[in-house]
Image (tube, coloured by chain):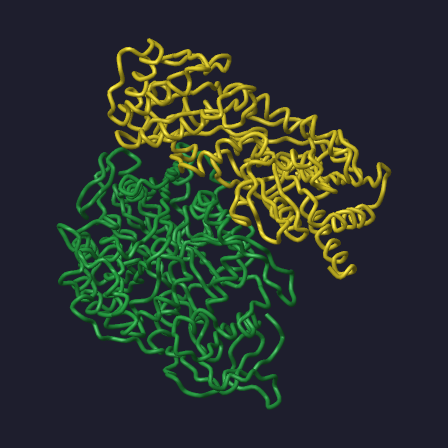
Chain colours: A green, B yellow
Amino acid sequence: MSRTQLRIAGGTVHDPANEVDGEVRDICVEDGRIVSHLPDGAPSLDARGMIVMPGGVDIHSHLASSSCNHARRLLPEEHSADPAPAPEVREGSGSRSGTGGTVPTTFTTGYRYAGLGYTTAFEAAVAPLMARQSHAELEDTPCLDSGFYVLMGNDEYLLRQIASGEQNRARDYAAWLIGSTGGYAIKIVNPGGIEAWKSGQRNLSGLDDALAGSGVTPRAILETIADAGNDLRLPHPVHIHCNNLGMPGNSAVTLATMQALAGRRAHFTHLQFHSYGGPGWSSGARPVIEYVNSHEEVSVDVGQVMFGPATTITADGPVEYLLHQSSGRKWVNIDIELETGCGIVPLVYKDKAAVSALQWAVGLELFLLSGDPWRVVLSTDHPNGGSFLSYPALIQLLMDRSVRDERLKQVNPKLLAGSPLADGLTREYTLNEIAVVTRAGPARLLGLQQKGHLGPGADADITIYSRDDDIAKMFATPRYVIKGGALVVEEGQLRRAPAGRRIRLQPGYDEAFLPDLRRHFEAYSTVSFENYAVQGISDDPIPLSS
Amino acid sequence: MSPAGRTEHVTCLGCGCGCDDITVAVAEGRIVDASPSCPIGRAWFGDGTLPSEVLRGGRPASVDEAISEAATVLVGAAGRCLVYLAPDLTTQAQRMAVAIADLLRGTVDSATSGTAATGLLAAQRRGRAGATLGEIRNRADALMFWAVDPAQRYPRYLQRYALEPVGTHVPKGRAGRFVIAVSVGAEQALKGADLTLELEPGEEITALSLMRASVQGRSVSSKVSPRLTQAVEIAARLARAKYAVLVHDAESTVEGRDSLRVEALIALTQALNEPTRAALSSLRAGGNRPGAESVLTWQTGYPFAVDYSRGFPRYTPAERGLDRLAGGAFKAVLVVGSPDLEQSAQETLSAVSSLAIGPRASQAAFKTRVAIDTGVAGIHEGGTAYRMDEVPLPLRPPLSGARSTTDTLRALTDAIRRELGRIGA
């Protein structure tokens, strides 16, 4: 970025990746990177009395995809209620107006993330066929370095390889797909279940339920793809949305999935939606988080539910159909050829609704019973559990027991009897733990060596907060946000809106399988093989460590 | 590439099918063959020759002069200008045109509002159950064509997507698909179906309602007319399929078509997802129209009819941009893309300061203050365009050398910024 120097002087620094916990020290920035020293007389920003952290890193968000755009289109009423005039930026190529709601427009998404002190975010679910759209949307999402996860595990070609035991070909295909789409990691959503939904089987619920026809099971899908991700040495292991999302009793399949992959690196996403006891609705958080705590190879993001409006957007088509049936709300389903699905239902989590209250409690239980903040990181599965704009309120619930207990008194207690939260959880997150679950932890889980910390060589993505007894207010309104060395937020106002970089990979693979893949395209795809890969992505892929 | 040679895997935007298997042969700077092709594709590619004029006040001018004039006109009309996204634009050009509207607090509208708005509004009320075209190809074992014969306006739809191909779940191709043709008055469905039904226009919505009721498990009285009884039987046949696809023409070109049709089709398709799986295929015209909707949605939250005059996007779906133009709402209009607008719009466009940037802008049927000829997305310009099912496809232009729309719009944006800076706005 800019050929400039900046000393952030005298702030109280929380940089857990470098074992700095609330020490007063200077942070030096030069040419968009953190450096160890600057000469005397370098420009200085007085941060005395303020809290300095790395810029936030969102490991799981739905912000830029064809599915997000279907959701935007479905919600004109939300957009009308939340107009977003263009911020008054000082330099650069100007700024854009937009609209908000649970699924804001792209420019507004970038500005609002930056306004919260977030400088990196990953779109969590991109159908490969639609990857071009995600790149275009991310180009129009300023202030954020970003990338996306590529949906696999219900794709016809991969299922065929699994059915015929072609593990190596499955791995090569996964590598090819990440490189062709410009993606960063592998995402599995409801392994096998989306194909079941599309082929009339409706869904798969157990790990050993088989897809009619091929006989492929969720277990085989999970094992094959997790191995592929680890064999390819992807910086972020396979990112898994388990079977049975949102169903009572689903903690059993969640635990079974973790056990099936025991010993393999794997990330389990929006764990809250997969941690319910059964057979009726109850909390299943404790056994799930205890498993996570005792297995170093497992990481999770929570997917907290926050009360208020949300929009559920997922490739998990069968879940959205059930949500549409039970809620009566409007519903979009798009089946995406040879690959995956897309379902959307807008809804509201109400504190007086028993299931919403349970979901809220389960998320908090996962956080409060977590034994390792580096492996249990913050998300709301934006906008599924709530908007990213609710992160400050969530942080307050984690840091302030009195606020949490007061809120607990207001929610429908019907399904909370015997739950850990109702029985009393006294833990309060420290500022350093918040810095872990919102920055350092996600960056480490993503394998991003230049993000989530303030050591020399890191990207100069920095958030500076004015201390405030109101934790939610403090985290909602950072005083300064620096992105790649540029002052994006000054005195709480967005002042610059630099373009972000794409964070993507191009893993190597054995090209011997390409003729077979081409034959598959020619037989079944409606897009030419030659037209499939996304071209012209501006940023180079990140090199993979050998 | 030009001036001679062959370009393979070219995407055709002649209709919304987005066939990307075209090989285009060029000789002496002209397209001499495009195959496999269809009548619409052949007409769309033509020989690829275009005028390359730059006009200011109807007289030849330099590009710089024309852009400077356009910027002055648009800035003078800030808050009261219309940016109209006509067909034949890349998605990249559409993004730049919407940015210009935002910068000028203008209004943006597109070809969509005049043709496909009804379906988009219905989907905003209800949602929808859809699929990409490949799902139809690979899964559809029952198809109901509702008042449409795709062969007329979407010539390769049946061959590439809906009827003939062998699919992953339809190994017998056409023989594995049960085809139902429902005609509504003069709107005839395709020929050669396995089952046909002819409805009067006045019966259409009742038929769709009864079909939905029966799919939802309600018993339908035997006292309804024989035609309606047959419609209910068709619904039962669709419900017995493994993957039912309903096909309709989402571009309303027929006077008097019931505006409730599309919403009734959406509702029926959604309901069919209880007993089986079903998707509605909405046929759309070409020139990257769905791209305009997609871009507008991610940049404004709304797919068409967006008004920036208050400094943020507002949705005005009940008032088409061109209708507001006729009502005197705008001082200037920037038409981007192929300026083949409807007759009534051409008269009002001639009465305001009209600027045209796009293929054959210099030959626009309305009077232009500025006209800059540029290339056609997909023939002369690379980038991205959307198929009718909103799958984004790359464009491989077989010809080069035409003035780029995106470069022209970029220059215009810069000129507008300079002009805004000069007047201190």
From the viewer's perspective, is A284 left or right of B307?
Answer: left
Q: Position of residue B49 (x, y in %)?
A: 73, 31
Q: Quadrant of residue B321?
A: top right
Quadrant location of the C terminus of chain B? bottom right
Q: Residue at x 29, y 63 (%)?
A: A300
Q: Position of residue B21 (x, y in %)?
A: 52, 32
Q: Residue furthest bottom?
A: A40
How many marks the image carries: the answer is 0
For residue A336, say whether it is visible.
yes
From the viewer's perspective, is B131 left or right of A399?
Answer: right
Q: Residue furthest top?
A: B226
Q: Where A193 sits versus B215, above or below?
A: below
Taking depth in this image into account, of A422 and A515 the one nearest to the observer is A422
Q: Residue at x 46, y 48 (%)?
A: A131
Q: Where A52 sits versus B331, above or below?
A: below
Quadrant location of the N terminus of chain B? top right
Q: Residue at x 47, y 69 (%)?
A: A117
Q: Residue furthest right?
A: B59
Q: Position of residue A61 (x, y in %)?
A: 40, 57
Q: Residue at x 14, y 61 (%)?
A: A417
Taking depth in this image into account, of B36 and B366 the one nearest to the observer is B366
Q: Quadrant of residue A147?
A: bottom left
From the viewer's perspective, is A478 left or right of A315?
Answer: right
Q: Position of residue A293 (x, y in %)?
A: 21, 69
For residue B398, say whether it is visible.
no
Taking depth in this image into account, of B263 and B6 the one nearest to the observer is B263
